[in-house]
Image (spheres, grey):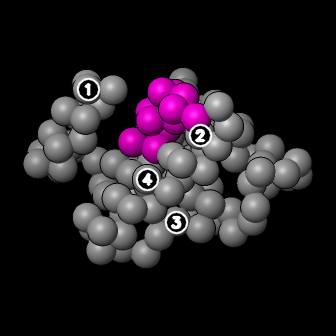
Amino acid sequence: MWRLLDEVPYWQENNTYPPDEIAVRFKNRIVRIHCFANGNGRHSRLIADIIIEKIYKLPVFSWGAVQLSGEGDARAAYLRAVKAADNGDYSQLLAFSRS
């Protein structure tokens, strides 16, 4: 976790990634800490929304504009995007975050 908290200011200061990607990368990395028995996805999406809104003054993410806690196509697409991000491909999660 400490490494992540050090990386984010570096990403910001050095314009390593655009704002959406910084927030989404943070979301993807923080969810792996598993601070809750359930709700890690909700927590990580909330944190990404806070980063994008409070730091960058941009609109919050839509995250598919549906409830992701139940089964369905949107949740399946979200989970595919998270798994791709886990493997270093953030393009699907970035796209889903604004869908």
Q: Nearer the viewer, mark 3 or mark 4?
A: 4
Q: Residue 63 vs residue 79: left or right?
A: left
Q: CA distance from mark 3 to mark 4?
A: 11 Å
Quadrant location of the C terminus? Answer: bottom right
Badge 2 marks a residue whose secondary structure is helix
Contact between marks 3 and 2 (CB within 8 A): the answer is no
Looking at the image, which residue is at 25% across and 64% down?
Answer: 55
Q: 63 or 92: nearer the eye? A: 63
Callout 3: 10 Å neighbours few (<14), some, many (20+)? many
Q: Which residue is mark 3?
A: 61
**Residue appearing at x 84%, y 51% in the figure:** 70
> Residue 7's spot in the image, x, y percent?
22, 34
Labels 3 and 4: the sequence-earlier one: 4
Q: Secondary structure at mark 4?
A: helix
Left or right: where does residue 26 sit relative to residue 11? right
Q: Which mark is residue 47?
A: 4
Q: Upstream in the sequence, badge 2 or badge 4?
A: 2
Q: Which badge, 3 or 2, comes first in the chain's sequence?
A: 2
Q: Nearer the viewer, mark 3 or mark 1?
A: 1
Q: Amino acid at mark 2?
A: Asn
- Residue position marked by numbered label 1 in the rendering: 2
Along the line of sight, the residue nearer the viewer: 15 or 54: 54
Q: Mark 4: few, some, or many residues within 10 Å (few <14, many ≥20)? A: some
State the image coordinates of residue 22 (x, y, percent, origin top left). 34, 48
Can you name the residue that lies furthest to the left here?
Answer: 13
Instruction: Please say if 80 is above or below 54.
Output: above
Alpha-carbon distance for marks 3 and 2? 17 Å
Quadrant of the rendering where the N terminus is positioned: top left
Q: Which residues are magenta?
A: 26-36
Mark 3 vs mark 2: in front: 2
Residue tagged 2: 40
| Mark 1 Cα shell of 10 Å, populated few (<14), some (14-19), many (≥20) | few
